[in-house]
């Protein structure tokens, strides 16, 4: 019997150490393929090795640890399919320390506990720290998990960050070869399934007073970069009736997005970034760039809203004599979690006397990308006030202990042979 009492504290120790690796001294920002990401990979790789795992960095910058199963531990050639666990190591700007990291550290600490007791499972376990889930530095997102799933096409590597550095060049700076992208792709036969642990980023578990829950489905999402081009001019001399003001045109677009989404339950859209140029108090803005993040659990509703928004933009362009160009930079359909894997996670939750709370995820996760390759399931962990993508994001040590207990019991009970095809 493994004494798990200390696992919650251990998880916090690792989480707090990772939170120090930030591009900014005052808050946590760690974008993909940066110096801080490289430091985080090295720190996690060290912990993986201490936990008895062999490790490697793949061609897209994911850090991967493997804990051999019973047969493989004595015979290297007996490589059996692995259960994949993990989440992302990048953060949003001024983000929280649990979003992503909890899903890498919890399995890592649980494997360490098994290893400390000399326990090998009848299957291998791989733990992955994905290189980019938030899509903060580059317009695209999930490119670490999509590379593993084999759904990341190489032209995405041409996307650039705000300094004009492409993903391909960022990979080179990271010590990787973008021409090697394909080698990051894994085979269907490599994995038994993927289980992602993640903070809920919502209020349900806290309201129900339950530490851990399971996920039914993950909402789909699309992202756009929109450019609005008008005519810059003198703030004091151009009459209002003669202006082609790109910023007031963009403002009308933003309110139209809000109106379209307010009409549909479960449809959400956010404009998180906007930049006006030339950016001077006494110059009418001639150009604006803004982002759109739009989501719904129903893909058809999201796609209908996207069409409606595009039509409204076209009308605003005519009315205001502007050029408005929305470019889609990312899209992922909503995905259902595997019922069998989810049931096994729920059984483990129940075995500790907790009620089983099942809920959809409005937030996107790496599991969406892995769903193209293997079965997926998610464990959600209660977080304070449902706050996330914010420095106040937090969980308790007790809940970290609870999710480690649930994962360990799931791992020790998991029988791959019991999974039926389909
Ligand atoms: O934006 C999301 O839903 C996720 O946190 N990347
Ligand atoms: Mn996340
Ligand atoms: Mn996030």
Image (cartoon, rainbow, N blue to C red):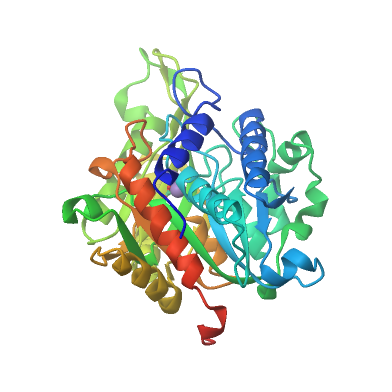
Q: Is residue 411 visible?
A: yes
Residue 371, percent across and down?
53, 69
Look at 21% across and 50% down and name the residue there.
206
Residue 384 screen position, x and y as percent: 26, 41
Q: Position of residue 305 (x, y in %)?
A: 34, 61
For residue 242, side relative to residue 146 (left or right): left
Left or right, residue 17 beside residue 187: left
Q: Quadrant of residue 243?
A: top left
Residue 366 vertical position relative to residue 246 in the rendered view, above or below: below
The residue nearer to you, when weighing 223 against 32, is 32
In the rendered image, the vertical position of residue 191 relative to residue 312, given as above or below: below
Numbered label tally = 0
Q: Is residue 229 visible?
A: no
Q: Residue at x 49, y 63 (%)?
A: 195
Describe residue 48's horizontal placement relative to residue 133 as left or right. right
Please say if 386 is above or below 84: above
Vertical comparison of 215 with 231: above or below: below
- Percent position (x, y) of residue 388? 34, 41
**Relative depth, front residue between 401 and 225:** 401
């Amino acid at each position: 019997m493994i004494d798990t009492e200390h696992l919650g504290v251990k998880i916090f120790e690792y989480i707090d150490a990772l939170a120090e690796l930030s591009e900014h001294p005052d808050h946590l920002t760690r974008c993909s393929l940066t110096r801080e990401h490289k430091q985080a990979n090295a720190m996690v790789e060290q912990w993986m090795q201490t936990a008895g795992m062999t490790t490697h960095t793949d061609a897209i910058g994911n850090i991967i640890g493997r804990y051999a199963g019973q047969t493989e531990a004595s015979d290297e050639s007996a490589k059996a399919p692995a259960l994949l666990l993990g989440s992302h190591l990048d953060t949003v700007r001024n983000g929280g320390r649990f979003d992503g990291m909890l899903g890498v550290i919890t399995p890592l600490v649980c494997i360490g506990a098994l290893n400390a007791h000399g326990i090998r499972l009848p299957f291998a376990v791989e733990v992955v720290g994905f290189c980019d889930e938030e899509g903060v530095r580059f317009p695209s997102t999930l490119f670490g998990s999509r590379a593993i799933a084999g759904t990341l096409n190489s032209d995405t590597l041409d996307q650039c960050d705000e300094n004009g550095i492409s993903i391909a060049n960022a990979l080179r700076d990271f010590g990787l070869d973008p021409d090697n992208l394909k080698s990051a792709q894994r085979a269907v036969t490599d994995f038994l399934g993927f289980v992602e642990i993640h903070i809920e980023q919502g209020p349900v578990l806290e309201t129900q007073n339950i530490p851990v829950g399971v996920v039914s489905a993950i909402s789909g999402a699309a992202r756009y970069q929109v450019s609005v081009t008008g005519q810059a001019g003198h703030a004091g001399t151009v009459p209002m009736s003669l202006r082609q003001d790109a910023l007031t045109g963009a403002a009308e677009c933003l309110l139209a997005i809000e109106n379209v989404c307010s009409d549909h339950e479960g449809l959400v859209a956010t404009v998180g970034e906007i930049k006006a140029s030339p950016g001077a108090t006494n110059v009418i803005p001639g150009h604006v760039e803004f982002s759109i993040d739009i989501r719904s659990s129903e893909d058809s509703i999201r796609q209908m809203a996207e069409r409606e928004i595009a039509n409204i933009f076209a009308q605003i362009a005519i009315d205001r004599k502007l050029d408005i160009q929305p470019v889609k930079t990312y899209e992922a359909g909503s995905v259902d979690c595997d019922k069998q894997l989810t049931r096994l996670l729920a059984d483990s939750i129940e075995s500790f006397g907790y009620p089983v709370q099942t809920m959809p995820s409005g937030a996107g996760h790496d599991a969406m990308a892995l769903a193209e390759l293997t079965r997926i399931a998610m464990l959600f962990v209660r977080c304070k006030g449902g706050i996330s993508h914010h420095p106040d994001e937090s969980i308790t040590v007790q809940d970290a202990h609870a999710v480690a207990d649930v994962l360990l019991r799931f791992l020790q009970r998991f029988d791959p042979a019991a999974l039926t095809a389909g």
